[in-house]
Image (spheres, rainbow, N blue to C red):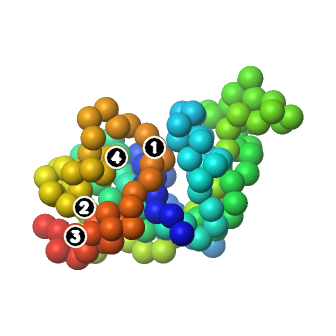
Amino acid sequence: MKYWLMKSEPDDISIDDLRDSANHTMSWQGIRNYQARNFIRDEISTGDSVLFYHSSCKVPGVVGIASVINQPQLDVSAFDPQSRYFDPKSDLNKPRWWQVDIQFTKKLNQIVSLQQLKSDPALQNMLLVTKGARLSVQPVTALEFEHIVKLSQTAE
């Protein structure tokens, strides 16, 4: 099993939206960054765990946990002209964009803010806190994942 951090703006998809969705499941689609796409296409697998992160909001941070419930598949939004993620250069024979479905596991007791993540010595090597790291899908280590979950139980 691998561990991931997936970012979403809460106005777009929040942890509550995931929890309240049918079967507590949503497609993680619309990723239009090649490095994040490569993580989805090449490394994410069914059963992987996800830290759900709210970005571009008043208090950005980790707000919940989800799990990946299927293998990567074509991102269907790339082929839908009505979708804001439509990509006219997408080709079914040579897919450009990929998605996975994630399922709600739990909402954290307390948000673990970006400020808290950046100031924690145990997380200094975490991709999220490195300068210029803006990927919406990024790997985390098992130790980072467990540490953040513990922080959520004691966060202010």
Q: Amino acid at mark 2?
A: Val
Q: The residue tagged with tag 1: helix, strand or loop?
A: loop
Kindly identify the residue that appears in the image at 59 percent across and 57 percent down.
44
The residues tagged by marks 4 and 2 sit, at their Cα atoms, a distance apart of 16 Å
Disc on res. 73:
none
Classify residue 41 as left or right of residue 112. right
Q: Amino acid at mark 1?
A: Ser
The residues tagged by marks 2 and 1 sit, at their Cα atoms, a distance apart of 17 Å
Classify residue 17 as left or right of residue 80. left
- 4 and 2 marks in contact (CB < 8 Å): no
Earlier in the chain: of badge 2 and badge 1, it is: 2
Q: The residue tagged with tag 4: helix, strand or loop?
A: helix
Q: Amino acid at mark 3?
A: Leu
**Residue projecting furthest to the right:** 93
Query: Quick one: 117 or 140, which is closer to the camera?
Result: 140
Classify residue 148 as left or right of residue 41. left
- Above or below for 94 versus 71: above
Q: Amino acid at mark 4?
A: Leu
Earlier in the chain: of badge 4 and badge 1, it is: 4
Disc on res. 136:
1
Residue 36 horizontal/vertical position (percent): 53, 41
Earlier in the chain: of badge 4 and badge 2, it is: 2
Disc on res. 151:
3
Disc on res. 112:
2
